[in-house]
Amino acid sequence: MMRTVSAAETAPTTHPWAVHAEGLRVRAGRHLAVDGLGLALGAGVHGLLGPNGAGKTTLIRALATVVKPAGGRLRLLGEPVDGRADLRRVRRGLGYLPQQFGFYPRFTVREFVEYMAWLKEMPKPLVPGAVQRAIDRVGLASKANARMKTLSGGMLRRAGIAQAIVNDPEVLLLDEPTVGLDPEQRLDFRKLLRDVGHDSCVLVSTHLVEDVVAACSDVVMINEGRLVYQGTPDDLIAQGGAGDAGDSPAERGYSALLHRHRAEAAR
Amino acid sequence: MTTHPTLAVLTRYAEGSGLDDATVWSVEVHLEGCPQCRAGLAGATTDGTRALLDRVAIGLAGGIAAGPVPARRRRLWSAVHRRWLIWALLPWLTMTGAVLGCAVLLERLQPGLPSLVLLLAPVAPLPGVAVAWSRRVDPAWELIAGTPAAGLTMLLRRTASVLALVVPVLVLAGARSGVSLALVLLPCLAFTTATIALGAVIGVRRAAAGVGVLWTAAVVLPSVVTEKLPVVLEPGSVPVWTVAIVALAAFAASRADGYRRLSSHN
């Protein structure tokens, strides 16, 4: 489908990083889940790895501007989003899939994605086309008119991904998007990630190390709210030796890094 | 707009021969914006083109017939009945209606008491407002909190739909018990504004609960016990309520950034 490219889309970016955090601290309840994290992400697919409770969800929530950072600096698309900043402009360029993904059970998939497109303040004439494109891209076209409550877990997840990409976001944040997807859908999803990551910044939190190696151009690993490692998947594989725990080279690299970080922290 | 091409040029364009590239491009650019010339072109088509167009039309018609039916236009009722807010509000509105009905009934039975409708009107919309901006009730709260539309405007829109349902009930109850409509509706509006204004600081649900408890303890209970209508609900207090509404609305507008995030208060 052809569409008109607006001047804003072709304007050169004036910010070096789509996501730029310095000394970021974010609370989850009373607990400081992200503690002094420094992170700079450009275009590409970034895989966010870390053990349970490492602060992945809290970090993604802060990046999605849903919770307010407790300290440090956070810039998205070149604009500050900490403190009392006006978030509207930044939020128009965001796509976000939360870990606990709530929806309105009586809505059809199309109505749900349309509603989200409306909330993201997309121009009205572009909405129907964008909605159809998003639904097609996640492979839900045959279920577009089904009520949300009749969908299976994997389909719901895909509907969630569709609402996240409907506005062609410049920063796409996906929290555990592959939960409930079958192997074939996961392959499709990786292709979608690579497509979107071509010119936007995609951050995917996951527990599946093989997903990161297959689909991501960059690995970000955090533990206890701090950055442990940032590099390419090949570097991650190179970190692991034969003696480390894990069934694949990437898993061995992951556990080697985590082990080293914990040993350093204990000292 | 470019100048209209002559009929001779159009005919040669339709035949697909005898024109240099530059002319073809300029004709095409012109045709995109000129319905008259498009009609002229349609009259100048050759047999081959017409046969091709027929084949395309048949193919398209077949594709349309085989494809999915176009989406039906949504009727107003189905749009209303899918809104979660309406369903989430239903129990609370039923309760509000029942309480106001009881108040009217009690006034009939106990004429000595001060008007209960008048006393309860300020707190009548508060449960609805609390429900409309609660992350426990709205399933997609986290998704919505990350969108640019989230914020004061959205809260106001939802509050408006609550008021659209509560105010008619209040007007009906007020007319039944024969009290001044201004004294029923102005405090109701003032308390709604107060809840929204306080909501930016402590969360809408807590604000609604706090304001409601305060009014009940400080005004409703004493006036029921002493059987006297409080000063704040005398006809002379209308200007005070109006000033309060304006002041509270200004405060709420100045704290608009308090509604933008997923706050733990709500």
Image (cartoon, rainbow, N blue to C red):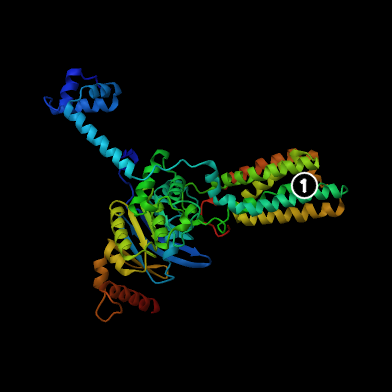
Report the amino acid beneath label 1.
Val
Is the C terminus of chain B in the top left, top right, bottom left or bottom right quadrant? bottom right
Chain bearing tag 1 is B
> Is residue B74 or residue A99 the one in the foreground?
B74
Question: Between B230 and B168, which is closer to the camera in this rendering?
Answer: B168
- Residue B232 can be seen, yes or no: yes
Q: Quadrant of residue B201?
A: bottom right
- Residue B239 picture location, percent across and down: 74, 38
Q: Residue at x 30, y 42 (%)?
A: B63
Residue A12 to residue A245: above or below: above
Provide residue A143's location: percent of width, then percent of height: 39, 53
Identify the residue under disc 1: B117
In the picture, measured across the screen, residue B173 lies left or right of residue B58, that is right
Q: Quadrant of the N terminus of chain B?
A: top left
**Does residue B95 appear to the left or right of A213 in the view shown?**
right
Q: Residue drawn 31% across and 73% down?
A: A254
Is B265 above or below relative to A1?
below
Q: Residues within 10 Å of mark 1 (few under 14, many from 20)?
A: many
x then y, percent, for residue B231: 81, 45
Q: How many marks?
A: 1
